[in-house]
Amino acid sequence: MAVTMDDQRGRVAVLAVDCPADRVGVGSVTMDTGVVAPGSFIVGVDASNDIIRWSLTVPRPSKTSSQLVR
């Protein structure tokens, strides 16, 4: 399965996940802060079969004390 992530500037990540028939396929990509432009982004999933079920988690980094509004 291919997973892509785009922001307003273009493609920022590509990830291939192997989906074995007998267990869950897992993949991840880590990006440095600032790689994705502020605002919305698009995640695309291209599965080879319509019966493949998938889920996606996109965590945001925690705000540090220097980023908090006082």
Image: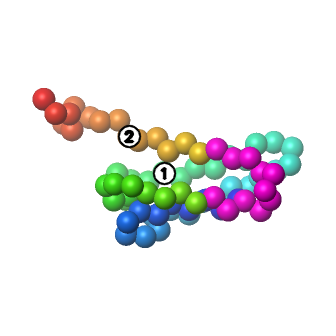
The answer to whether residue 46 is left or right of residue 12 is right
Up/down of 11 relative to 50, above or below:
below
Whole-percent x and y of residue 2? Answer: 66, 62
Q: Which residue is mark 2?
A: 61
The answer to whether residue 69 is left or right of residue 33 is left
Which numbered dot is residue 55? none
Residue at x-position 49% and y-position 59%: 42
Whole-percent x and y of residue 3? Answer: 61, 59
Q: Which is more N-terminal, label 2 or label 1?
A: 1
Under mark 2, the amino acid is Pro
Whole-percent x and y of residue 22? Answer: 86, 44
Q: Is residue 22 one of those drawn in magenta?
A: no
The residue most toward the left is 70
Residue at x-position 33% and y-position 59%: 37
Q: CA distance from mark 1 to mark 2?
A: 11 Å
Q: Which residue is mark 1?
A: 30
Residue at x-position 50% and y-position 44%: 58
Whole-percent x and y of residue 41? Answer: 43, 57
Under mark 1, the amino acid is Thr
Give residue 14's quadrant in the image.
Answer: bottom right
The answer to whether residue 60 is left or right of residue 70 is right
Residue at x-position 38% and y-position 40%: 61
Q: Are marks 1 and 2 in contact (CB under 8 Å)?
A: no
Give residue 40's quadrant in the image.
Answer: bottom left
Up/down of 23 relative to 19, above or below:
above
Would you call the spot at circle 1 few (<14 residues within 10 Å), some (14-19), or many (20 or more)? Answer: few
Q: Give the residues drawn in magenta, as a range.
A: 45-55
Magenta highlight: main SS: loop
Q: Quadrant of the N terminus?
A: bottom right
